[in-house]
Image (spheres, rainbow, N blue to C red):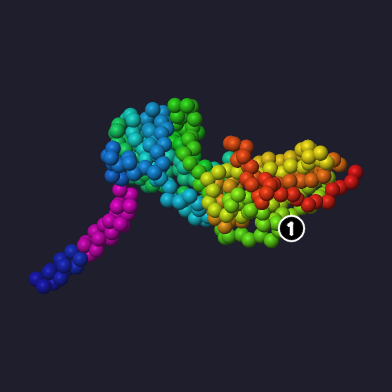
Amino acid sequence: MAHWLIGSLSYWLIGSFFLLALYVPFAYTLPAYARPALLSPNDLSRITHPFTATFDDSIELLGYDLDTRAVKPGETLRVALYWRALAPMHESYRVFVHVVGAENRRAGGVDVIPARGAFHTVYWKPGDMLRDIVQIPIAPDASPGKYTLQVGWYPLGKVNQPLTTQEGDTRVTIGAIKIAPRAARVYEPRVRVNANFAEQIELIGYDAHVADDTLELVLYWRALRALSTDYTVFIHALDAQGNIVAQVDRQPQSGNYPTSIWDTGEQVRDEYRLPVTTSMRRVIVGLYDATTGQRLSVATSDSIEVNFTRVSK
């Protein structure tokens, strides 16, 4: 009898441990992959960036949240997307969120099934609303600059058949994000000027070099405060009468690093090339708001002069 009890207890313990071994992984992973709680109309007031876009008259984007305005290469960007089902869906769709810069340069992105794979769109009912958090790894070699977030959908396994918006687009741009340098940069220009433009931006100095009848000019800027305006840099070459004989007008780093993403105290290196002509006598540099044409003042002027050695022909 004792042997029978011991044997039965042994089998019971072995069976219990076996069931526990099966249960533990599910106990820890199921909560992480559980379907999200559906939202009520009152929950929509939580959206920090309302945005409306409809995909194939089936899925509506209501807005998004961003935890930060800037990330660094190698970090993870967290985006919350708000969705509403407009019609029954008979396919499972993937949503993609891509971080895209100038010249369609990708710095990161994910293609996922909502709710970390736990809430396929075939289970969505018309009127269902959910908040879906997407984690986007930023490439370790991503170049610093301004990027946009592009969002869209496609059927599972059919990446080349994306859903389209009412405007016929296969993706929508919902907002911008800054990819910042890994570490703060400090520059030592050859010529230091410390020119203060309207208490907003300082031109620390510049490097100027003439080669092959081209002025190679590197400007070094510093943000004196956080800015909301994307200022345009102008570099004008003037003749003896003050007429413009060559010019470059563009946002810093060819528009890849506009002033609206600069942080207070941040230093920015900005390169330009300008043809050198025999009529050139002066080169001036300044900043202006392209929407109004208003130049930023510096001392008693609206520009500073760059010294360079003119090449004789």
Image quadrant where one finds the N terminus: bottom left
Horizontally, is 52 left or right of 23 in the view? right
Most foreground residue, 178 or 311: 311
**Which residue occupies 62% across, 45% down?**
296
Tell me, yes or no, whether the highlighted magenta stretch contains residue 23: yes
Range of magenta residues: 14-34
Q: Which residue is outermost to the right?
A: 313
Q: Is residue 79 above or below residue 193?
A: above
Q: Which residue is outermost to the front?
A: 300
Residue under circle 1? 191
**Which residue occupies 83% across, 41% down?**
240
Most foreground residue, 48 or 159: 48
Instruction: Give the image location of residue 97, x and y in percent.
Output: 47, 42
Amino acid type assigned to the residue bearing label 1 in the image? Val
Image quadrant where one finds the C terminus: top right
Horizontally, is 116 left or right of 311 in the view? left
Instruction: Give the image location of residue 191, x and y in percent.
Output: 74, 58
Which quadrant would residue 290 be assigned to in this image? top right
Which quadrant would residue 80 be assigned to in this image? top left
Instruction: Give the image location of residue 16, x and y in percent.
Output: 21, 62
Is any atom of residue 10 visible in this view?
yes
Task: Label 1: state its secondary structure.
Answer: strand
The overriding secondary structure of the stretch rendered in magenta is helix
Q: Which residue is outermost to the left?
A: 1
